[in-house]
Structures are given as structure tokens and as C-alpha cells.
Amino acid sequence: MVKLPHEIELLKRSARIAEAGMKRASELIEPGRTEREIAAEAEYLMRKSGSEGTPFPTIVASGANSWIPHATTSDRVLQKGDHVVVDLGAIYQGYCSDLTRTFRVGKEGSPLIEKVRTTQEQIREEVREGAKAGDLDSLARKKLGKDAKFFAHGLGHGVGLRIHERPSLGPGSKDVVREGMVITLEPGLYVPKRGGARWEDMFLVKKDGCLPLTGHL
């Protein structure tokens, strides 16, 4: 759905709050912390920053839980080497935000994390007025190569007063991206015994490209 200028400003504020929550979560990625503890601390910081709540249950998924695309946060204790998927959002004056990062406990990233991050960077270059949502999803799968079989959901979705709005950026989608829409791009890979990784940001669609509303961390 195309957003009015005042809606875009509210979405930007919601996105900044989500980034604050993610920064707090990133500070707690260490052995001995629990998924639930990290989620609670991130939500508390977002509340203090002006969030009215969360548009979906905050996800902190570590170790084998990271293999599940949209896992339920648990009392699992983080261990060194774990992949940790953190997916969170804020609500500001009714407008939602959606942000995902994947961390590695005690280590500097992984090839899996780097692959989803660079895939998102490549796909965002193709986002502009008139782009076909289904084509963007197909391109993401092409960029992921042989690992695309582990990409278990669509590339993204619109965001606004609801966390999932049109356009739907999934396989076979006939939706068309329009200037003024706010969308997510969230390539993910979920590989048993190897780990899960997702990298999600929000973007404002422009005539000749897109503007990131998140992505500052």
C-alpha cells in the first residue's frame, strides 16, 4: 500500500525504535544468556523509546532453533558458536516496523550470515517503481544459488498499520512495487546442523530506487 508523507515519517520513527531494540539485543549475544532474556531486554528498551508494543512476538532463536524460520523464543541458553536470529519490531502511533539480524555467539559472523546479507544488498539495487514483486523473489533465489532450497519463505512484504501488507514479495506474486510503498527484504537460509540466518530491513520505494529505513547497524 502506498503511504502518505506523514505515514512515512511515523514509519521512520518506528524503524528507529526497532533499531534501538536490536542494538540492545546485540549487546547481549554472549554465552550464558537465554533467548527469553535477550527478547525481554530488547522489548523493554523499545518501550522506553516510545513503542506502544510489538507487532508480533519477538523472536530470538539460537542454535538448532535458528533452523526454524519463525521460531518461538525459549529458555535455551546461548552457547559459543551458535547462530542467533533476532527478529523484532515496534509500534509507533499505530505504525509497525520489522527488523532482523543474525549474530554468531563469540565469533565474527559466518559464511551463511554473509550470504543472506549480501543477497539483500544485491536485491535492494533492483527495487524501484514498477518492479514486479515475484521477480524480486525469484532473483533472490537465484543469488542464493544452490542454497536457495533452504530459503523457506518469501522475500518480503509491505509494512504499515499492519505488519504484513501488500505487496507480497513471494514466489509467483503478481503484485507490483509502487513509489511510496514501504517494504521489507528478508532473505533467509535455514540449514539443519549448519545454522539459520536471516537479514531483514525496511525500505521506502522511490521512483528510481529505494531508501533504507533501517540498516544502520
Image (tube, grey):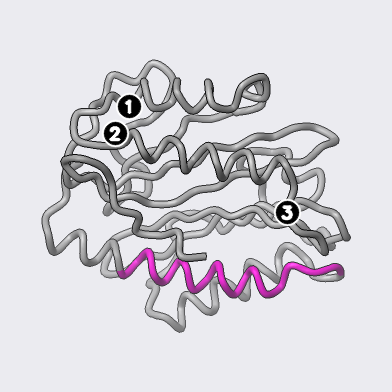
Q: Quadrant of residue 176?
A: top left
Residue 130 against residue 12 in the figure, above or below:
above
Q: Are marks 2 and 1 in contact (CB under 8 Å)?
A: yes
Magenta stretch secondary structure, dominant: helix
Label 3's element? loop
N-terminal of the two: label 3 or label 2?
3
Q: Which residue is mark 3?
A: 109
Q: Which residue is mark 2?
A: 167
Which corner quadrant holds the N terminus?
top left
Q: Which residue is mark 1?
A: 133
Q: Residue at x 56, y 72 (%)?
A: 23
Given the image, on which type of amino acid does mark 3 rest?
A: Gly
Q: Residue at x 45, y 66 (%)?
A: 18
N-terminal of the two: label 3 or label 1?
3
Q: CA distance from mark 2 to mark 1?
A: 7 Å
x, y percentage for residue 214? Answer: 41, 60
Residue in the foreground of this view, choosing between 113 and 87: 113
Q: Are marks 3 and 2 in contact (CB under 8 Å)?
A: no
Q: Which residues are magenta?
A: 13-31
Q: Is residue 30 magenta?
A: yes
Given the image, on which type of amino acid does mark 2 rest?
A: Pro
Q: CA distance from mark 3 to mark 2?
A: 31 Å
